Amino acid sequence: MFHFRARTPRVAAPEVPRQAVLQATLPDGRVVDVLRVHHARSRGMRLSVTERGIRLTAPPRTSDRRALAFVQEHAAWLAGQLAHTFDGIDALRIGETASLPLRGVDVPLDWADGRCLRVHGDDAGVTITLPARARESSVRKSLADFYLAQARADVGRWLPAYLPGLPRAPRDIVIRPLTSLWGSLAPDDRMRLDLALVLAPSAAFEYVLVHELCHLIQPNHSSAFWDEVEHRFPGWETQRHLLRSHGRPIKARLRALCDVRKAASA
């Protein structure tokens, strides 16, 4: 008896970009870390700054010497981008930080002693109740949960007004920290919104929600899509400009305060 076996074709694993860290010197003498990523599809070197830090994307086999020379050539530009993104942003200091960003303003932050860790907000501001020996990681996680609850409350307050004019509701809405986007709508109607939006003015947050809802009608950015946005949210251009011009500092401030790795809502 003969047995025939079909050979399973080998599928090449997707290439994982190689990473390394370079150290560059800014014009003021500061030394900063630059994440260098070698990527097969890169045709040239590209330098960028996000709330996560500095990133250099380069073609394969680019030497460290050449990569570092490219970064140093743009050191002045880099210093300006870092200042725009991170100046005035401080990490959370347990028992010391006196205010928190929320809905476009800095609200007072009070610290209180207590048996259980709790973050509570009211019209007077935010209070963080700390048990003895509370860990910083636990406080940052609790603050992320507080922001998440505030963001969910905002979406829950705005959403009912827009649903009647839509062909269907989003399948679900996930609120979590996003890197390059403020929101997205997947082909299966699952929506994602950036948690950092709750730090921005409420009108900017609501605009992003409306923007993604309109993709249920027009899954593109055609003129018809923008007509739908304009019909539901006149003045949206102002909010888009705000997020484009101040978005990185808003995202960076969230990362400075919270444990964003654990902040998500389904």
Image (spheres, rainbow, N blue to C red):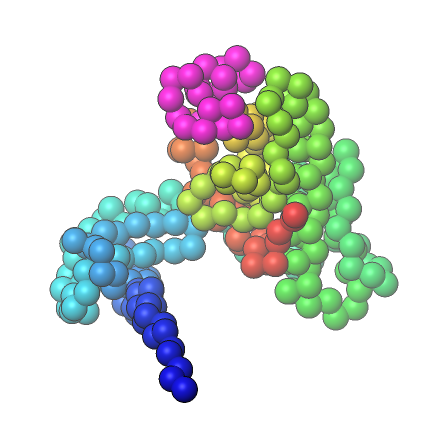
User: As drawn, which residue projects farthest toward the right?
Assistant: 115
* Residue 207 in sight: no
* 185 relative to 93 in the view: left or right: left
Figure check: 14 above or below 79 = below
Q: Is residue 265 in view from this perspective?
A: yes
Please check the rendered image and state whether residue 37 is part of the magenta-colored stretch, yes or no: no
Q: Where is residue 127 drawn, in percent x and y?
A: 76, 48
Total numbered labels? 0
Judge whether 25 appears above or below 188 on screen. Answer: below
Viewer-proximal residue, 14 or 22?
Answer: 14
Q: Residue 245 falls in which quadrant of the image?
A: top left
Image spot of residue 39 (x, y percent): 25, 61
Picture quarter with the N terminus:
bottom left
Residue drawn where x is 56% and y is 59% of the image: 261
Q: Is residue 234 a member of the stretch shown in magenta? A: yes
Name the residue at 53% across, 28% down. Answer: 216
Q: Nearer the viewer, residue 236 or 60?
A: 60
Residue appearing at x 50%, y 40% in the figure = 186
**Picture coordinates of residue 182, whole percent (x, y):** 49, 38
Which quarter of the picture shows residue 205?
top right
Judging depth in this view, the residue of 29 and 235 nearest the camera is: 235
Foreground residue among 3 and 240: 3
Write the start and end of the magenta stretch as one range: 215-240
Relative placement, left or right, of 64 versus 237 is left
